Image (tube, grey):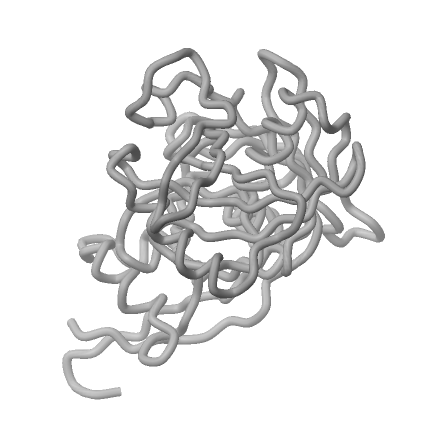
Protein backbone atom coordinates (compact mmCIF):
# COMPACT_ATOMS: atom_id res chain seq x y z
CA UNK A 1 0.00 0.00 0.00
CA UNK A 2 1.31 3.46 -0.92
CA UNK A 3 1.10 6.48 1.36
CA UNK A 4 -2.31 8.12 1.04
CA UNK A 5 -4.06 4.95 -0.08
CA UNK A 6 -6.72 2.99 1.77
CA UNK A 7 -7.90 -0.59 1.41
CA UNK A 8 -11.55 -0.93 0.38
CA UNK A 9 -13.06 -4.32 1.33
CA UNK A 10 -15.30 -5.68 -1.43
CA UNK A 11 -17.15 -8.84 -2.37
CA UNK A 12 -17.66 -10.16 -5.91
CA UNK A 13 -21.21 -11.50 -6.28
CA UNK A 14 -23.36 -12.76 -9.14
CA UNK A 15 -26.87 -13.80 -10.06
CA UNK A 16 -27.34 -15.85 -13.26
CA UNK A 17 -24.13 -14.47 -14.72
CA UNK A 18 -24.91 -10.84 -13.84
CA UNK A 19 -21.85 -9.93 -11.75
CA UNK A 20 -21.35 -7.09 -9.29
CA UNK A 21 -18.85 -5.54 -6.94
CA UNK A 22 -20.51 -5.22 -3.53
CA UNK A 23 -19.24 -2.84 -0.84
CA UNK A 24 -20.63 -1.74 2.49
CA UNK A 25 -21.95 1.82 2.41
CA UNK A 26 -20.04 2.86 5.53
CA UNK A 27 -16.75 2.09 3.79
CA UNK A 28 -17.35 4.64 1.02
CA UNK A 29 -18.98 7.52 2.89
CA UNK A 30 -17.87 10.77 1.30
CA UNK A 31 -16.71 9.14 -1.93
CA UNK A 32 -18.05 10.15 -5.33
CA UNK A 33 -20.10 7.02 -6.00
CA UNK A 34 -20.49 7.64 -9.72
CA UNK A 35 -16.73 7.83 -10.17
CA UNK A 36 -16.23 4.88 -7.84
CA UNK A 37 -18.57 2.73 -9.93
CA UNK A 38 -16.75 3.64 -13.13
CA UNK A 39 -13.42 2.74 -11.54
CA UNK A 40 -14.38 -0.51 -9.81
CA UNK A 41 -16.53 -1.88 -12.65
CA UNK A 42 -13.92 -1.29 -15.34
CA UNK A 43 -12.87 -4.78 -16.47
CA UNK A 44 -9.32 -4.12 -17.71
CA UNK A 45 -8.30 -1.59 -15.02
CA UNK A 46 -10.64 -2.15 -12.06
CA UNK A 47 -12.21 -5.22 -10.47
CA UNK A 48 -14.63 -5.64 -13.36
CA UNK A 49 -18.39 -6.11 -13.12
CA UNK A 50 -21.83 -5.26 -14.50
CA UNK A 51 -22.44 -2.85 -11.63
CA UNK A 52 -21.59 -1.60 -8.15
CA UNK A 53 -23.81 -2.55 -5.20
CA UNK A 54 -23.85 -0.67 -1.89
CA UNK A 55 -25.39 -2.32 1.15
CA UNK A 56 -26.23 -0.55 4.38
CA UNK A 57 -28.77 -0.27 7.16
CA UNK A 58 -32.14 1.01 5.97
CA UNK A 59 -34.34 3.69 7.51
CA UNK A 60 -37.67 1.89 7.09
CA UNK A 61 -36.25 -1.60 6.49
CA UNK A 62 -33.34 -3.53 7.99
CA UNK A 63 -31.30 -3.30 4.78
CA UNK A 64 -30.74 -0.67 2.10
CA UNK A 65 -29.30 -1.12 -1.37
CA UNK A 66 -28.00 1.24 -4.05
CA UNK A 67 -26.84 0.13 -7.48
CA UNK A 68 -24.67 1.97 -10.01
CA UNK A 69 -24.05 0.97 -13.62
CA UNK A 70 -20.48 0.85 -14.98
CA UNK A 71 -21.04 4.26 -16.58
CA UNK A 72 -21.79 5.75 -13.14
CA UNK A 73 -25.56 6.10 -13.49
CA UNK A 74 -27.69 4.96 -10.55
CA UNK A 75 -30.28 2.30 -11.31
CA UNK A 76 -32.37 -0.54 -9.90
CA UNK A 77 -31.42 -4.19 -10.42
CA UNK A 78 -33.30 -7.41 -9.69
CA UNK A 79 -30.26 -9.68 -9.81
CA UNK A 80 -28.31 -7.26 -7.65
CA UNK A 81 -31.20 -7.23 -5.18
CA UNK A 82 -30.97 -10.99 -4.72
CA UNK A 83 -27.20 -10.75 -4.23
CA UNK A 84 -27.68 -8.11 -1.54
CA UNK A 85 -30.37 -10.25 0.11
CA UNK A 86 -28.06 -13.25 0.38
CA UNK A 87 -25.17 -11.12 1.62
CA UNK A 88 -27.37 -9.43 4.23
CA UNK A 89 -28.56 -12.76 5.59
CA UNK A 90 -25.16 -14.43 5.67
CA UNK A 91 -23.33 -11.38 7.08
CA UNK A 92 -25.78 -10.83 9.93
CA UNK A 93 -27.62 -7.72 8.76
CA UNK A 94 -30.81 -9.73 9.38
CA UNK A 95 -31.61 -12.80 11.44
CA UNK A 96 -34.55 -14.24 9.50
CA UNK A 97 -34.86 -15.34 5.85
CA UNK A 98 -37.81 -12.99 5.20
CA UNK A 99 -37.13 -9.25 5.32
CA UNK A 100 -37.29 -6.08 3.22
CA UNK A 101 -34.70 -4.01 1.36
CA UNK A 102 -34.92 -0.28 0.66
CA UNK A 103 -34.10 0.51 -2.98
CA UNK A 104 -34.37 3.22 -5.59
CA UNK A 105 -37.71 1.65 -6.57
CA UNK A 106 -39.12 1.45 -3.05
CA UNK A 107 -39.04 -1.11 -0.26
CA UNK A 108 -38.87 -4.64 -1.68
CA UNK A 109 -39.86 -7.76 0.35
CA UNK A 110 -37.52 -10.73 -0.14
CA UNK A 111 -37.78 -14.36 0.94
CA UNK A 112 -34.78 -16.69 1.06
CA UNK A 113 -35.35 -20.41 0.54
CA UNK A 114 -32.91 -22.45 2.62
CA UNK A 115 -31.76 -26.04 2.26
CA UNK A 116 -29.65 -27.55 5.05
CA UNK A 117 -29.12 -24.03 6.38
CA UNK A 118 -27.77 -22.68 3.09
CA UNK A 119 -29.41 -20.20 0.75
CA UNK A 120 -30.77 -21.98 -2.32
CA UNK A 121 -32.93 -19.33 -4.03
CA UNK A 122 -34.24 -15.85 -3.32
CA UNK A 123 -37.68 -14.52 -4.24
CA UNK A 124 -38.16 -10.76 -4.52
CA UNK A 125 -41.56 -9.10 -4.79
CA UNK A 126 -40.84 -6.39 -7.34
CA UNK A 127 -43.28 -3.45 -7.55
CA UNK A 128 -46.23 -3.81 -9.95
CA UNK A 129 -45.20 -3.05 -13.53
CA UNK A 130 -45.89 0.40 -14.93
CA UNK A 131 -47.23 0.44 -18.48
CA UNK A 132 -48.11 4.06 -19.22
CA UNK A 133 -45.53 5.72 -21.50
CA UNK A 134 -44.90 8.59 -19.10
CA UNK A 135 -44.01 6.09 -16.36
CA UNK A 136 -41.71 3.99 -18.56
CA UNK A 137 -40.69 6.73 -19.64
CA UNK A 138 -41.16 6.76 -23.43
CA UNK A 139 -42.23 9.73 -25.52
CA UNK A 140 -45.20 8.20 -27.32
CA UNK A 141 -48.96 8.55 -27.03
CA UNK A 142 -51.41 5.98 -25.69
CA UNK A 143 -51.94 4.01 -22.50
CA UNK A 144 -49.46 1.21 -23.21
CA UNK A 145 -46.60 0.47 -25.61
CA UNK A 146 -47.47 -2.70 -27.53
CA UNK A 147 -45.98 -3.76 -30.87
CA UNK A 148 -44.75 -0.21 -31.51
CA UNK A 149 -42.98 0.13 -34.90
CA UNK A 150 -39.57 1.76 -34.59
CA UNK A 151 -37.16 2.36 -37.47
CA UNK A 152 -33.55 1.92 -36.35
CA UNK A 153 -30.54 1.90 -38.69
CA UNK A 154 -32.76 0.98 -41.61
CA UNK A 155 -34.49 -1.86 -39.74
CA UNK A 156 -38.01 -1.85 -38.34
CA UNK A 157 -38.41 -3.44 -34.92
CA UNK A 158 -41.67 -3.89 -33.00
CA UNK A 159 -41.26 -2.72 -29.41
CA UNK A 160 -43.17 -3.56 -26.25
CA UNK A 161 -42.14 -1.43 -23.28
CA UNK A 162 -42.69 -1.48 -19.51
CA UNK A 163 -41.07 -0.26 -16.31
CA UNK A 164 -40.34 -3.07 -13.83
CA UNK A 165 -38.26 -0.88 -11.55
CA UNK A 166 -36.27 0.37 -14.53
CA UNK A 167 -37.01 0.98 -18.23
CA UNK A 168 -37.21 -2.03 -20.55
CA UNK A 169 -38.05 -2.49 -24.22
CA UNK A 170 -38.79 -6.00 -25.49
CA UNK A 171 -38.63 -7.27 -29.05
CA UNK A 172 -40.50 -10.56 -29.44
CA UNK A 173 -39.07 -12.51 -32.35
CA UNK A 174 -39.18 -15.96 -33.92
CA UNK A 175 -35.39 -16.23 -33.62
CA UNK A 176 -32.85 -14.45 -31.45
CA UNK A 177 -30.74 -11.91 -33.35
CA UNK A 178 -27.35 -12.68 -34.87
CA UNK A 179 -24.27 -10.84 -33.59
CA UNK A 180 -24.40 -8.09 -36.20
CA UNK A 181 -28.08 -7.33 -35.69
CA UNK A 182 -27.80 -7.43 -31.92
CA UNK A 183 -24.71 -5.22 -31.70
CA UNK A 184 -25.92 -2.79 -34.36
CA UNK A 185 -29.50 -2.22 -33.22
CA UNK A 186 -29.46 -2.67 -29.44
CA UNK A 187 -27.32 0.38 -28.52
CA UNK A 188 -29.26 2.55 -30.97
CA UNK A 189 -32.55 1.54 -29.33
CA UNK A 190 -31.03 2.16 -25.88
CA UNK A 191 -30.19 5.75 -26.76
CA UNK A 192 -33.14 6.50 -29.07
CA UNK A 193 -34.68 9.96 -28.47
CA UNK A 194 -38.01 8.32 -27.60
CA UNK A 195 -36.39 7.19 -24.31
CA UNK A 196 -35.37 10.25 -22.26
CA UNK A 197 -33.71 8.02 -19.63
CA UNK A 198 -32.51 5.43 -22.17
CA UNK A 199 -33.78 1.84 -22.12
CA UNK A 200 -32.54 -1.70 -21.73
CA UNK A 201 -33.32 -3.90 -24.73
CA UNK A 202 -34.51 -7.51 -24.48
CA UNK A 203 -34.76 -9.78 -27.51
CA UNK A 204 -37.22 -12.57 -26.62
CA UNK A 205 -38.10 -15.91 -28.17
CA UNK A 206 -41.18 -17.65 -26.74
CA UNK A 207 -40.48 -21.39 -26.66
CA UNK A 208 -43.62 -22.50 -24.80
CA UNK A 209 -46.34 -21.01 -22.55
CA UNK A 210 -43.95 -21.44 -19.61
CA UNK A 211 -40.55 -20.76 -21.16
CA UNK A 212 -38.94 -17.79 -22.89
CA UNK A 213 -35.35 -17.38 -24.07
CA UNK A 214 -33.80 -13.92 -24.11
CA UNK A 215 -30.71 -11.95 -25.08
CA UNK A 216 -29.98 -8.80 -23.11
CA UNK A 217 -28.60 -5.34 -23.77
CA UNK A 218 -28.62 -3.36 -20.52
CA UNK A 219 -28.64 0.42 -20.51
CA UNK A 220 -25.39 1.80 -19.16
CA UNK A 221 -23.71 -1.61 -19.42
CA UNK A 222 -24.02 -3.29 -22.83
CA UNK A 223 -24.62 -7.00 -23.27
CA UNK A 224 -25.04 -8.94 -20.03
CA UNK A 225 -25.54 -12.60 -19.19
CA UNK A 226 -28.65 -11.94 -17.07
CA UNK A 227 -31.10 -9.23 -16.01
CA UNK A 228 -33.68 -9.71 -13.28
CA UNK A 229 -35.90 -6.74 -14.04
CA UNK A 230 -35.53 -7.54 -17.74
CA UNK A 231 -36.71 -11.11 -17.18
CA UNK A 232 -39.66 -9.67 -15.25
CA UNK A 233 -40.45 -7.32 -18.13
CA UNK A 234 -40.42 -10.14 -20.68
CA UNK A 235 -42.63 -12.35 -18.51
CA UNK A 236 -45.12 -9.56 -17.79
CA UNK A 237 -45.43 -8.41 -21.40
CA UNK A 238 -45.75 -11.95 -22.76
CA UNK A 239 -48.50 -12.58 -20.17
CA UNK A 240 -50.28 -9.38 -21.25
CA UNK A 241 -50.14 -10.60 -24.85
CA UNK A 242 -51.59 -13.98 -23.83
CA UNK A 243 -48.55 -15.96 -24.99
CA UNK A 244 -47.41 -17.29 -21.60
CA UNK A 245 -48.81 -18.45 -18.25
CA UNK A 246 -47.53 -18.47 -14.67
CA UNK A 247 -44.86 -19.35 -13.83
CA UNK A 248 -42.67 -18.27 -16.72
CA UNK A 249 -39.09 -19.52 -16.94
CA UNK A 250 -36.94 -16.82 -18.50
CA UNK A 251 -33.65 -18.21 -19.79
CA UNK A 252 -30.64 -16.05 -20.59
CA UNK A 253 -27.02 -16.90 -21.26
CA UNK A 254 -26.27 -16.77 -17.54
CA UNK A 255 -29.11 -18.96 -16.27
CA UNK A 256 -32.84 -19.15 -15.57
CA UNK A 257 -35.21 -17.03 -13.51
CA UNK A 258 -38.79 -17.90 -12.59
CA UNK A 259 -41.36 -15.12 -12.83
CA UNK A 260 -45.00 -15.05 -11.72
CA UNK A 261 -47.33 -12.09 -12.08
CA UNK A 262 -51.02 -11.28 -11.93
CA UNK A 263 -52.49 -7.94 -13.08
CA UNK A 264 -52.33 -5.12 -10.50
CA UNK A 265 -49.99 -7.20 -8.32
CA UNK A 266 -46.26 -7.27 -7.56
CA UNK A 267 -43.95 -9.41 -9.69
CA UNK A 268 -42.50 -12.49 -7.98
CA UNK A 269 -38.95 -12.99 -9.25
CA UNK A 270 -37.12 -16.13 -8.09
CA UNK A 271 -33.56 -17.20 -8.75
CA UNK A 272 -30.13 -17.89 -7.26
CA UNK A 273 -27.37 -15.55 -6.13
CA UNK A 274 -23.79 -16.31 -5.13
CA UNK A 275 -20.97 -14.65 -3.24
CA UNK A 276 -17.88 -15.54 -5.27
CA UNK A 277 -14.96 -14.07 -3.35
CA UNK A 278 -13.80 -11.30 -1.01
CA UNK A 279 -10.94 -8.91 -1.69
CA UNK A 280 -9.35 -5.52 -1.11
CA UNK A 281 -9.04 -2.69 -3.61
CA UNK A 282 -6.61 0.16 -3.03
CA UNK A 283 -8.16 3.62 -3.27
CA UNK A 284 -6.40 6.99 -3.17
CA UNK A 285 -7.25 9.14 -0.20
Where 246 sits versus 178, above or below?
Answer: above
Query: Residue 40's quadrant in the figure?
Result: bottom left
Residue 194 rendering spot, x and y as whole percentages: 28, 33
Quadrant in the picture for the N terminus = bottom left
Q: Residue furthest bottom?
A: 2
Where 29 sits versus 169, above or below?
Answer: below
**Residue at the (20%, 88%) spot, across then down:** 2
Residue 270 rendering spot, x and y as whole percentages: 68, 40
Along the viewing direction, whichever of 51 and 102 lies nearer the viewer = 51
> Is 266 on the left or on the right of 283, as rendered?
right
Where 255 sits versus 191, above or below?
Answer: below
Residue 185 rendering spot, x and y as whole percentages: 41, 52
> Is 282 on the left or on the right of 186, as rendered?
left
Q: Residue furthest front?
A: 154
> Is 216 on the left or on the right of 251, as rendered?
left
Along the viewing direction, whichever of 157 and 7 lies nearer the viewer = 157
**Residue at the (77%, 31%) spot, across then down:** 247
Is residue 234 something one can see in this rendering? yes
Query: Residue 27's quadrant in the figure?
Result: bottom left
Along the viewing direction, whichever of 247 and 63 lies nearer the viewer = 247
Quadrant in the picture for the C terminus = bottom left
Is residue 23 something one can see in this rendering? no
Amino acid sequence: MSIGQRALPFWKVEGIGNDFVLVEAEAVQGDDLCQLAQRLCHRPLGIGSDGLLLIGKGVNAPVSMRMFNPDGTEDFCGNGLRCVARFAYEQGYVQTPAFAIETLSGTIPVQLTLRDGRVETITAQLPPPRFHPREIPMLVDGEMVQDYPLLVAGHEVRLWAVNTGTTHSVIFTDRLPDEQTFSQLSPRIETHPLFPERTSVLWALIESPHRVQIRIWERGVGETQGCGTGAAAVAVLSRVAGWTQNPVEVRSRGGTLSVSWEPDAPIALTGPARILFEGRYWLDG
